Amino acid sequence: RYNVDHERIRLEWYGEENLVNKCADGINCPEFNHQLNRRSELVLEAFSNTALAYELPEEFVSNEKDLCEELDFFEVLQKELKEVPTVYFDFDKSSIRKIHQKDLERIAAMMKRMPRLMLSIEGHTDQRGSEDYNKSLSERRANAVGQYLLERSIETERVQSNWFGKTKPVHDCDLEDCTEDMHQLNRRTELILRK
C-alpha cells in the first residue's frame, strides 16, 4: 500500500516464547492477561545497515547536542510516563484495579527493553485508621504492585519497595476536612523510575 521496500522489513515470530506475563496456553488466568499476550509488536530501527552511508536531516546535523545522550532519553522517558506513576486503591484494599493493569504492563515492557532501569515503589494510605494498621496496609499495597511486575519477569533486584502508612499524604486530612476524593488521592502507590 505504501510501497515500502520489502528489504526494509524484517518479520519475526515467537509463539509462546516472549510472553508479556506467565499466562501461557492452558494456564488459568483472567482473559485480560491472555489478551495481553496476543499481540504484534512493531520495532523501528534507525540505520540498521551500518555498511551504508545515510544523510541526516539538516536540523539533526546542526544540532550540537548528542541525540542519543542517555540522560536526555531518560528525561523523555519520564515525560512519557508522567501519567502512569500512581496506582490508586479502594478503601482498606490492596488489590490492583483493572484500570491500572495496562499501566503496569507498559512499565514491565519498558523495563524489559531497558535493563538498566530501576524502579522504586512507594506505598501510602489515607489517614483514617491506626498508624500500625496503615503501615501494614501500605506495605501490602507496595508489595501488590511489586508482585505484579515480578510475575512479568522483572528481576527482584531492580525493584525496591518502601511503605509510609499515612505519614506522607497528598492531602493532610488532620489539618482540613477531606472529601472522599481527597482520601482517594492519599490511597496510592507511587512508581518512580531511575537509572
Image (cartoon, rainbow, N blue to C red):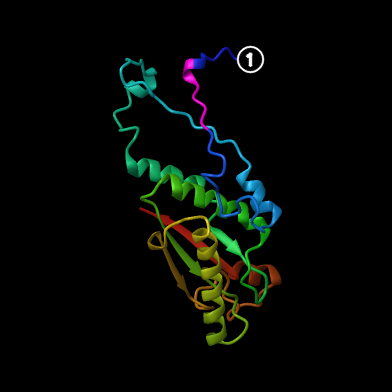
Q: Is residue 5 magenta?
A: no
Q: Residue at x 61, y 39 (%)?
A: 39
> In the rendered image, which quarter is residue 56 located in?
top left
The answer to whether residue 167 is above or below residue 82 is below
Looking at the rendered structure, the kind of residue marked 1 is Arg
Foreground residue among 87 and 148: 148
* Residue drawn 60% across the image and 51% down it: 24
Main SS class of the magenta portion in the image: loop
Element under disc 1: loop
Q: For mark 1, what is the residue? A: 1
Residue 159, image x and y in percent? 42, 62
| Residue drawn at 40 percent across, 46 percent down | 114
Which residues are the magenta region? 7-12
- Specify whether residue 122 is in view: yes
> In screen coordinates, is 67 left or right of 177?
left
Residue 162 in the image, given as x and y percentages of width and height: 45, 71
Position of 167 with respect to 72 (left or right) is right
